[in-house]
């Protein structure tokens, strides 16, 4: 099993084909602390041999720069379907995060552990708005 791609985005669905908006953001901007972000998604596409296909355990962590949980880890199962023909199967996971509160301007990361192995690590920053030349927030 290997990760074909993984990213954070504003919204995603994987009903049939994958659809995503705001793909690959690297930062969340907030005017004041704590920063509450209304919604974002983790998208992971995996490829596996037909031998490895089947139901898999997943645990997703949202952690701060010190490795502490921002929210409790999210646990679940997903199916990597066996391909009707050929030797590789594709499976997709879309995980939604709603109303997450970030206590500090800092670096955070979303990590996905599949079958006990960390397969995804996506860092991002939570930061204040950029300053205008006169020192005011943009």
Image (tube, helix red, strand yellow):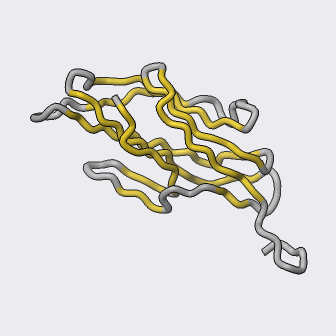
User: Residue 51 appears at what percent x and percent y?
Assistant: 21, 21
Q: Position of residue 122 (x, y in %)?
A: 56, 43
Q: Residue at left 78%, top 61%? A: 128
User: What's the residue at 12%, 34% (across, down)?
Assistant: 86
Q: Residue furthest left?
A: 85
40 horizontally vs 32: left or right = left
- Asked if 19 appears above or below 47 in the picture, the reply is below
Query: Which image quadrant is residue 64 in?
Result: top right
Q: Position of residue 71 (x, y in %)?
A: 66, 35
Q: Residue at x 82, y 77 (%)?
A: 132
Q: Quadrant of the C terminus?
A: bottom right
> Which is nearer the eye, 45 or 39?
45
Q: Is residue 77 left or right of residue 109?
A: left
Residue farthest right in this picture: 135
- Residue 70 left/right relative to 103: left
Total tally of numbered discs in the picture: 0
Which residue sits furthest bottom? 134
Quadrant placement of the N terminus: top left
Q: Residue at x 47, y 42 (%)?
A: 95
The quarter of the picture where residue 29 lies is: bottom right
- Could you say where residue 117 lies in the image, as x and y percent from the top left? 48, 23
């Amino acid at each position: 099993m290997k990760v074909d791609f993984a990213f954070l985005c504003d919204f995603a669905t994987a009903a049939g084909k994958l659809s995503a908006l705001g793909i690959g953001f690297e930062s969340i901007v907030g005017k004041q602390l704590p920063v509450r972000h209304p919604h974002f998604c983790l998208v992971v596409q995996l490829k596996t041999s037909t031998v490895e296909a089947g139901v898999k355990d997943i645990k997703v962590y949202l952690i701060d720069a010190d490795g502490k949980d921002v929210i409790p880890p999210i646990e679940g199962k997903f199916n990597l379907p066996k391909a009707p023909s050929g030797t590789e199967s594709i499976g997709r996971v879309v995980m939604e995060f709603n109303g997450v509160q970030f206590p500090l301007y800092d670096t955070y990361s979303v990590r996905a552990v599949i079958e006990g192995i960390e397969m995804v690590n996506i860092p991002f920053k939570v930061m204040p708005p950029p300053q205008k030349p006169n020192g005011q927030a943009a």
